[in-house]
Image (spheres, rainbow, N blue to C red):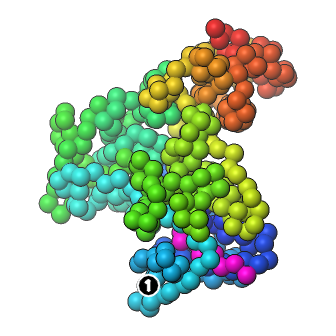
């Protein structure tokens, strides 16, 4: 019997636990989490807060009892104090103050990430929130319901920031969106795409303050103003969405770390300690676009990493296929999807790339329900292998196309291979000269 202790019971930890419990009879599984709940889909927070869905209940996809029914031992609202890696024991404390000590044969660290807190004066004032846990969503939802909250500042125009800005606007608030960068979503999309998103945000009433760094939060007891390089803005609520850092507190003094502090793992999710695995946002991933180890914090990556770790601990040697960082966003009906590297991301990472752009309608002109689609395919100049793709449209049909590009990156497909790809035509779905084909054909 192998005893595996999993610290952290959200997406990555849950995937690892399910893999072990569902596939291997000789596994004893212990799960420890300091939260009151598990399996919360944080990507749905903005939908709930913005009242695009009726309630938050559906954002939980499993519960404690499901794992107990499979034979797992679960400690909720229990904080791990420290790990004795030499003697292979986990020391924790329950909310009642009771000490818990669990031995392990194998350990999985699924401790996730922590929000970046801006180190500026006034950051401890009331009405300043982050968005990570379910409780954070509850707090923001409660604040938005208050009549006295009229001006909302969102700090950070990445995915979470843009989504919660839309949600606050849908709740009737005056929303100011700040970012030190000069545009939204710069980590995933090139300017050709984000210019349209920025216009979309502005046309829907979001006040954009790009190229402005928050320097101070002012107020007596609660926040009353945000001070940036460019001025001072009265606000009643601040939502910080600057980004996240890997939560490495428990193992940073024992395990080898990546440049950003994430646990460095191999393709089996194994750390520098052979009995310790790390999964999800606290660990590195292998990028097929970069062809090297990197850090990409996404729930989909977390789930896959948990599955890989579970099988390897269970006795089935399984290597991660790597990731592309595939992602998507939908704001006020405008959809953007991407995978792999943007042109700017490639340049930042020293990858010399070329790209091909194309723009056309999704379907032939005679079709009534039709929308324009923009596409960019990014490929390595010398090898010509596809390393990224971006698409944007008001039609959601582009979403499935990005999965094909994700596989193309994983398999090292060249841009030339895609030029005569067998893509079917039917007016209900697409054009006879499909925009994917046309973008590939335009590649020099």
**Corner quadrant of residue 12:** bottom right
- The residue located at (59%, 17%) in the rendering is 381
Closer to the camera in the image, 101 or 215:
101
Which residue does the image show at 70% across and 29% down from the upper left? Answer: 412
Q: Is residue 252 left or right of residue 387?
A: left
**Residue 167 is one of the magenta-drawn residues:** no
Near mark 1 (Cα within 10 A), the count class, few <14, some 14-19 or many ≥20, is: some
Q: How many marks?
A: 1
Report if residue 52 is visible in the image. no
Residue 287, quarter of picture: top right
> Relative to residue 426, is residue 63 depicted above or below?
below
Q: Secondary structure at mark 1?
A: strand
Residue 30 is situated, as x and y percent measured from the top left of the image, at 61, 79
- The percent position of residue 2, horizontal first and vertical second, equals 69, 78
Please tell me whether residue 40 is drawn above or below residue 216 in the rendered image: below
Residue pictured at 46% horizontal, 47% vertical = 160
Most frequent secondary structure within the magenta stretch: strand
Q: Quadrant of the N terminus?
A: bottom right
Between 109 and 228, the one nearer to me in the picture: 109
Q: Which residues are magenta?
A: 1-9
Q: Would you name the residue on which mark 1 appears?
A: 93
Q: Is residue 7 magenta?
A: yes
Query: Residue 378: where, in percent of width, then height?
Result: 59, 22
Horizontal side, residue 416 vs residue 56: left or right: right
Between residues 222 and 119, which one lies in front from this camera angle? 119
In this view, which residue lies farthest toward the left? 220
Can residue 68 be seen in this snapshot?
yes
Above or below, 157 relative to 15: above
């Amino acid at each position: 019997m192998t005893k595996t202790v999993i610290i952290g019971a959200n997406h990555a930890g849950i995937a690892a636990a399910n893999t072990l419990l569902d596939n291997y009879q000789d596994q004893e599984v212990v799960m420890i989490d300091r939260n009151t709940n598990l399996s919360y889909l944080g990507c749905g927070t903005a939908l709930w807060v913005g009242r695009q869905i009726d309630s938050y209940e559906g954002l939980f996809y499993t519960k404690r009892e499901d794992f107990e029914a499979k034979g797992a031992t679960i400690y909720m609202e229990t904080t791990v104090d420290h790990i004795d890696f030499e003697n292979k024991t986990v020391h924790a404390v329950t909310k009642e103050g009771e000490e818990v000590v669990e031995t392990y044969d194998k350990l999985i660290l699924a401790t996730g990430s922590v929000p970046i807190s801006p180190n500026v004066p006034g950051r401890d004032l009331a009405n300043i929130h982050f968005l990570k846990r379910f409780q954070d969503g509850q707090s923001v939802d409660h604040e938005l319901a208050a009549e006295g909250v009229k001006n909302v500042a969102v700090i950070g125009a990445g995915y979470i920031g843009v989504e919660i800005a839309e949600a606050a606007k849908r709740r009737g608030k005056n929303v100011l969106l700040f970012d030190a960068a000069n545009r939204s979503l710069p980590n995933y999309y090139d300017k050709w795409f984000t210019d349209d998103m920025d216009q979309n945000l502005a046309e829907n009433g979001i006040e954009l303050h790009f190229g402005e760094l928050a320097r101070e939060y002012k107020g007596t007891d609660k926040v009353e103003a945000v001070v940036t390089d460019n001025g001072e803005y009265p606000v009643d609520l601040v939502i910080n969405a600057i980004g996240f850092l890997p939560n490495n507190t428990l193992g940073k003094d024992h395990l080898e770390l990546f440049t950003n502090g994430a646990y460095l793992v191999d393709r089996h999710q194994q750390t520098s300690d052979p009995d310790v695995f790390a999964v999800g946002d606290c660990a590195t991933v292998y990028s097929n676009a970069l062809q090297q180890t990197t850090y990409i914090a996404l729930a989909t990556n977390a789930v896959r990493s948990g599955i890989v770790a579970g099988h390897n601990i269970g006795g089935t040697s399984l290597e991660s296929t790597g990731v592309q960082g595939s992602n998507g966003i939908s704001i006020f009906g405008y959809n953007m999807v991407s995978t792999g590297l943007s042109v700017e991301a490639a340049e930042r990472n020293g990858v010399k790339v070329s790209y091909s752009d194309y723009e056309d309608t999704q379907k032939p002109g005679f079709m009534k329900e039709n929308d324009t689609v923009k596409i960019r395919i990014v490929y390595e100049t010398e090898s010509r292998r596809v390393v990224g793709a971006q698409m944007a449209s008001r039609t959601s049909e582009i979403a499935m196309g990005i999965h094909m590009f994700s596989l193309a990156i994983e398999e090292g497909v060249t841009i030339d291979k895609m030029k005569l790809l067998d893509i079917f035509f039917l007016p209900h779905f697409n054009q006879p000269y499909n925009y994917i084909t046309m973008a590939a054909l335009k590649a020099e």
